[in-house]
Amino acid sequence: MYANPETLKDLCIDYVCDNIEQFYMAEQDISETDLQPSEPKYMFWDSNVYLPMEVSEMLLTKLSVRNKLNDETLSLFSHKNVYLRHVTLPKTKNLTTKGLRTLRKHKIKKLKVYGLDCPVNELVGLLGEWTTQNLESLCVSNSSFISDSYDLKFCVAVSLSKLKNLRSLDVSNTEFSTNNLIAVVEDLPHLESLDISNTKVDTLSPLGKKKNQLKKLSVYNLKEATMHLIAFSPLKCMTSLTHLDLSSEKYSHPFENFSCDTPWLQFLTDPDWLPNLVSLDISGSDNVGPRIMQDFLTTHKKLRFLGLMHMDDCGLAMFTVPTHPLYNRDLVVTGVVTEEQLLTGLKRYKKRPTYIQKCLYHLFKWTEKYNYPKVDIIQLILNVMNCLSDSFPVQMAATACLYNLTKSDLALNIHPSVLAKVVEATLDAMERFPNHNQLQKNTLLTLCSDRILQDVKMDKFRCAKLVLDSLHFFNDNVMNRMSVAICSILAAKISTSETSQLGSNPRYMAKLLSIVFEKLSTRIVDVTMKFTLSALWNLTDESPTTCKVFIDEGGLALYMNILNTFIGDSTVETKVLGLVNNIAEVPHLRNMLFSNDIIPTLRRLLRSVQIDVSYFAAGIIAHLACEPSWEMYTVNNKAEVLEELRYTVKHWVPPEGEMVAYRSFQPFIGLLKSINTPQVQLWAAWAILHVCTKNGKKYCDMLNNENGVNILQTIAFDKSVDREVCELCYSILDLMNKFRKVSNPVQPTDTF
């Protein structure tokens, strides 16, 4: 039914990442001389823990990806506790040289750090002697070489020249220049792979000295290059090259003339040019045309990858029609014509926003046609969303694709762990781009799914808050409907403290009430109104603060108007009375109900043929009857109303299912103890028996945990208590006893 769930190893690493704060402690050292506390030392609770290399490296990378890696958590990766050989840190914004010193005592062979804040030369200076002498691969993409103490040329020369065993170097998206390139060529004798994409290098001439050694070269998007043929002349004789990336961002500078951008294209007509090429990327170049492309492929039989993004050539028959004589099933091509081209682009261009945006734009059309789950595609999209989290065009297109890939019945056949990642990426996009209408609409479309809201583990509070933010910011009927639907479900699934945080925000409350007011004005009861009423009901549940904000924002007067307008609409009446019941549970707010002259309306609703309506009307009356100053607030005869309450409760026929869900029985405890008002006790006992009968597993345990047995026994054994109340209490106790026996059956003893 589902794609395979994640491995136990991955699940464990995810758990540790999510709860990393629980696995370590800070130890404070006190100096013997001045008794001043030094900086705390962080360590695992079990100081003897030792993680194997694969687990150590996976955990470190995942913490970095989730932005949970800082100087404090990195210090846990001491050589005494973990084993690191290949270190990959995709996100380093929270790291300084202080934390990076942890790497000093590790023997590292490959080091990848992206977007490092501290200068690269400081990073290299922090490496241990063994690593400095043996490091084979270094990536410092999107980092900086600039230091306050040294000029750029000196920084590069000092830092990189130490790494004599370096075979692979990635300095893409840095200030790396032609002078730095000259120094690197001189100082790194074993260099085989070089990425100088998006740097200030303006010629490849210095690479002439590596013509028989360099195997991989990436010069993507050299905007500062002179682009004359002489700048690329070393490419003519680099016979050892197997991977070459000459791509460019064709649309990053729309007003530039690109006619002279790719003078090296004439190399394609040379049958002896780079005969060992396995991978060539010329994306963003001038179109080559079928004749030259055909000749090139004919003379380069080893080619297995060809990048053709932003080029019409990707649509040539030799790349799209399997029956074409030159079609090669072993050749992978990037472009926008076929699904395979698009998916390959998502895999290879995770750091290139314009390429990814183009891929996602065209992929969207494909996702509209899928009628079965495509988990592999979802994972690719999630990867690029994570890598390009600050790119609005990418996030916009990605959220649209994710909706198509998880909508309707598709989500039912996708494993919850995958959907959880979809939700996390969706919420990240919502949070990062709160003011963009269509992106917010895309995210709401994805989240507004029963499968996701009911079955997927997520940060429900965060989700509800972001949805309410979107609801407040935009005035769009479609978005309003989805927002209130999501909130109505989530509000019932988060803690009371969290619902209070949300509901007590006047901005959220005012927006929700404005939706209700609009529906009341037009006398329309639609799904939007019903979901909004449900959301307000759940947000006020056991939250006096939210109830007060609701009243302050004019909610009570509005609700009274609703009760007297939509007479007989039991769905509306139930939701409205449910919220009013929440207010009635708060003693210091009850006078507000009296002030709105609610008793006559409640007496009318008490006689409703719909038990849900009658039940909540009775509950409100029960709470108000506990108010000593009943006569002060209303002209209604209390004894007469209470007898109506008793008569109604005695004649209820219990419904087949639950009418309401409770977070606790605390609101009932005080009512059960109302010895002077047996009618109130009767309603409370009936309500407790009802929910325990319908959902014993939940409510019998809840009642037991809240000292319900003692309270019920005290009432049941009290001869002064009303006989009907006692009978209900006995029924509840009997039910609890039966459920306890079912839940904890006596196990037979083995005999020998």
Image (tube, grey):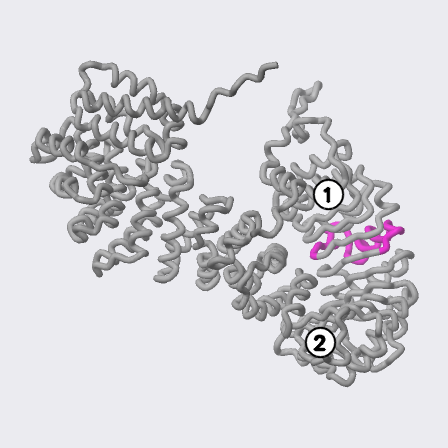
Percent position (x, y) of residue 561?
A: 18, 50
Q: Is residue 736 left or right of residue 685?
A: right
Q: Does the stretch in magenta take in 152?
A: yes
Residue placed farthest to the bottom in the image?
291
Q: Bin the neighbour count of mark 2 within 10 Å (Cα to Cα): few under 14, some 14-19, many 20 and up.
A: few
Image quadrant in which the C terminus is located: top right
Distance between the alpha carbons at the discs numbered 1 and 2: 42 Å
Question: Which residue in the structure is indicated by mark 1?
Answer: 57
**Which one is earlier in the sequence, the residue at label 1 or at label 2?**
1
Percent position (x, y) of residue 476?
A: 36, 62
Question: Are discs 1 and 2 less than 8 Å apart at CB?
Answer: no
Q: Is residue 341 left or right of residue 436?
A: right
| Residue 395 in sight from this viewpoint | yes
Percent position (x, y) of residue 485?
A: 37, 52
> For the residue marked with disc 2, what is the amino acid?
Pro
Percent position (x, y) of residue 685?
A: 25, 27
Figure check: 702 above or below 295: above
Q: Residue at x 84, y 55 (%)?
A: 157
| The image quarter in which residue 649 lies | top left
> For the residue marked with disc 1, what is the amino acid?
Glu
Q: How many marks?
A: 2
Q: Is residue 195 left or right of residue 4?
A: right
Figure check: 95 above or below 45: below
Q: Bin the neighbour count of mark 1 within 10 Å (Cα to Cα): few under 14, some 14-19, many 20 and up.
A: many
Q: Residue at x 74, y 38 (%)?
A: 102
Question: Which residue in the structure is indicated by mark 2?
Answer: 322
Q: Residue at x 69, y 70 (%)?
A: 334
Q: Does the stretch in magenta take in 261?
A: no
Near-viewer residue (200 or 333): 333
Element carrying mark 2? loop
Q: Which range of residues does the magenta coloring cover? A: 142-167
